Image: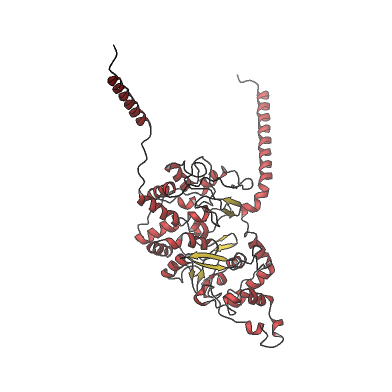
Amino acid sequence: MQRPALTVIALRAARALAGAALLAAALPAPAAAPDPALVERGKYLATAADCTACHTAPGGGKPFAGGYSIASPLGAIVATNITPSRTAGIGNYTEEQFARALRQGVRADGAHLYPAMPYTAYTLLADEDVRALYAYFMLGVQAVNEELAEATRLPYPFRVRGLMAVWNALFLDDRRFEPDAGQSQQVNRGAYLGRALAHCSTCHTPRNMFMAEQGGLQLAGSPLGPWYAPNITPHANGLQGWSEQEVVQYLRTGQVPGKAQAAGPMAEAVEHSLQYLREDDLQAIAAWLRTVPAHAGEGGDTPPFARGAAHDLEPALRGRDGPNALASLDSGAKLYSGNCASCHQPDARGSDGQAYPALFHNTATGGARADNLVAAILLGVQRTVDGKQVLMPRFDERSSVNRLSDEQIAQIANHVLQQHGNAALQVSAADVAQARAGGARPFLAEVQPLLLPVGLVALALLLALAVWLTAWVRHRRRRTGPAR
């Protein structure tokens, strides 16, 4: 007996609905609608963490698409694509995998990151901030599906990423930020921003022979390629002579006339990150810096910005003091006159408004090291703050107009130091050549050529020892005979 057509249709519809219900129960629940406030908060946190400085290629690269080559002492480390692309970026990361990459430096595929990505600082991030960052990178960033043209290829053995597991076991303090009950809410906020998100210690804390931060010298100053990240502890050689408002001004603009101006990596931090932070957050960082343990670093008790004065040699250089005056001047003065005086003034007073700063009362010329003075001449200074560009041309081989030799740059640096800065310092052509090559090489970089042959010798010795032990055991068994 045939069922009416309508009954058949109803039964089929019921079965379809039941099947759909079972299928829906088997599938994961759909993701909740994105919270715009959470995404916006994640954007602010990513700005505070300065993610764009490394993960966006200079010269118009797409945001967070990677390709920026970080010049580490062990070789170039190419920043990866961290857009939500499922083919080229991190679009397949779960929140847990994202958190593990941030805090432990381990990718979703289990490979280890190098600490050029400052996970040693990001490990302090709170769960709610990791969640906000994840929401921003998954929902607030445009996916870029382009593979990188080059990838990180460090020399052996540093290319073996598994070795980072040993490094992490020795040097990664994997724990979250804990407020100090003895400090104010403002100081604790500044400590969280400065230690975790802004990762100040990554540049400003000296490192040991294995390139891990020396915790007992937090923020006491450290070489950074050709640059030097200065002491920012409340010591006379650091920030003791700075007011909190001057620290805030420096973080926001990159310049405090009569004290310092940002260049190199610090200029990047100001341009891409710090200028966009809220005023109360900048004040919190400044308040926190007042509370960190003071260290002398590599300097004495004289504030770097206290040295020097205006001194104009131009009249003598132009021959106003007689025919023999020119011969009495060293070539540093002539080179300064021809390459620097038009912007910094013949007496090194700088321009009105200090867009071109004075070269006295300046941490780059009055500090215990001349690294930043040499690096600024070689590489120039460039930062854009509040839509206004500050630019000093570079004088290295990449300059299209002004190319100075190592000896010429050393002569200019020594002239500036003698006349306007720390006269106790002396720069050699070899110092400039070292800066031009990327700065002093750390211990690991120096011994790298020896690591492969030493490793092979050690492996051969271990194999020989294993063979000898095996033969010795067999010999002992033959002498003693079978056990009874």
Q: Percent from the top left, x then y, of residue 232?
A: 48, 64
The answer to whether residue 231 shows anywhere in this view is: no
| Front position in the image: 461 or 154 | 154
The answer to whether residue 287 shows anywhere in this view is: yes
Q: Is 449 situated left or right of 64 in this image?
A: right
Q: Is 463 situated left or right of 294 in this image?
A: right
Identity of the residue drawn at 64% across and 72% down? 412
Q: Percent from the top left, x then y, of residue 86?
A: 49, 41
Q: Does 447 appear above or below 323?
A: above
Q: Percent from the top left, x then y, of residue 69?
A: 58, 53
Q: Percent from the top left, x then y, of residue 359?
A: 56, 74
Q: Does 344 appear above or below 484?
A: below
Colour theme? secondary structure
| Front position in the image: 65 or 418 | 65
Q: Does 171 appear above or below 481?
A: below
Identity of the residue drawn at 36% across and 38% down? 30
Farthest-out residue, front: 5
Farthest-out residue, top: 1
The C terminus lies in quadrant: top right
Q: Is 165 situated left or right of 473 in this image?
A: left
Quarter-of-image position of residue 277: bottom left
Quarter-of-image position of residue 381: bottom right
The N terminus lies in quadrant: top left
| Front position in the image: 378 or 147 | 147
Number of residue marks: 0
Identity of the residue drawn at 66% across and 70% down? 410
